[in-house]
Amino acid sequence: MSQPHDILFSTLADPTRRAIFERLCRDGDQTVGALTAQAGVSQPAVSKHLAVLKRAGLVRDRHEGRQTHYSAQLNALAPLVDWTNQMAGFWQSRFDDLEDLLRRMDQ
Amino acid sequence: MSQPHDILFSTLADPTRRAIFERLCRDGDQTVGALTAQAGVSQPAVSKHLAVLKRAGLVRDRHEGRQTHYSAQLNALAPLVDWTNQMAGFWQSRFDDLEDLLRRMDQ
DNA sequence: CCAATCAATAACTGTCGAGTTATATGATGT
DNA sequence: ACATCATATAACTCGACAGTTATTGATTGG
C-alpha cells in the first residue's frame, strides 16, 4: 500500500526537512554546514533529514573533499503533481457525470 | 512559521487519512459509516481523521438525520499546487531542464 | 417511551520519529 | 604523523499522534 507519493507526503510533512528542501530549490547546491547554519537544529539532525530526503529521491549528494554538497532533484516531485491531478480528475469526472445525469433528466 | 501548505502536508501524510480523502474525491459524498466500512480502522479512528481533514479545510460535513455526510473540498489543495509551482519556479530560474515536470503540470 | 443506530468524545496505550549529545569516519593542511 | 575540520552514525530521550475500547449524545422506528 506504499505508493510513491506516500513517501513524498511523509517526507515533506516535517517543516524542518521541507525548509531544507526549499532552501536547496531556492539557492541550489549547498553543503551540510551551510544548511545547518540556518536550519535551527543540530548538524546531526540536518544530516538525518538529508538522508530521508535522499531516500525519497528529492536530493542528490556530491562529495567534494571533506564536504558533502546536496542539491534538489525537482523531478522527484512528479508523483505529487500526478496525485493532485488525479484528485482533480476524479472531481471533474464526477462533475461531468452529474451534468450528464441532469441532461438526461431534462429531455 | 506555519504556512497553509504545512497543514496540508502533515494532514495528507497519514496513509489512512489520505485514503479517506481519496475515496471522497473518487466517489463523492459519503457517510462516516460507509467510510469506516473500507477504512480498515475503527469508527472512532475514522471520525478523528475526518476531524483533522476538516480542520485542514479538505472536507466539509453535512448532517442529515443521525448520519453525517462528508465531501471533499478540492480547492483546499490549491496551496499544495502553489508550493509545487514555487519550487519549480526556483528551479527553473536556475536551470532550464524540467520539461517533463511542466508537461505533467499542464495537463 | 424504548431500543437500536450513527457519530463523536473520552481516556488510555504503544509506536514512531525528530531532536539531543557523544563518537566514529574521513579528508586536509602543516 | 597529527591536529583540525566536515559529515555521518550511534545511542538515547521525549512528545506527538494513530490506534484501541468504552461511553455519551442525538435521531429514528416500533
Image (cartoon, coloured by chain):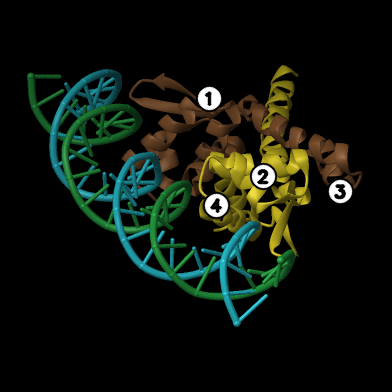
Chain colours: A yellow, B brown, C green, D cyan
Q: How many residues crowd around disc 2 within 10 Å: few (fewer than 14), some, or many (20 or more)?
A: many
Three-letter code for the amino acid on which mark 4 is drawn: Gln
Gap in angstroms between the C-alphas marked 1 and 3 = 31 Å
Closer to us: A47 or B17: A47
Location of residue C12 with respect to A94 vertically, above or below: below
> Label 3 belongs to which residue?
B100
Q: Earlier in the sequence, mark 2 or mark 4?
A: 2
User: Tags 4 and 3 in contact by the CB under 8 Å rule?
Assistant: no
B52 on left or right of A80: left
Question: Do tags 2 and 1 sit on the same chain?
Answer: no
> Label 1 belongs to which residue?
B57
Quadrant containing the C terminus of chain A in the rendered view: top right
Numbered label attached to residue A21: 2
Three-letter code for the amino acid on which mark 2 is drawn: Phe
Three-letter code for the amino acid on which mark 1 is drawn: Gly
> Label 4 belongs to which residue?
A43
Question: Do tags 3 and 2 sit on the same chain?
Answer: no
Q: Residue at x 80, y 36 (%)?
A: B90
Q: Chain of mark 4?
A: A
Q: Which of the 4 image quarters holds residue B104?
A: top right
Gap in angstroms between the C-alphas marked 1 and 4 = 35 Å
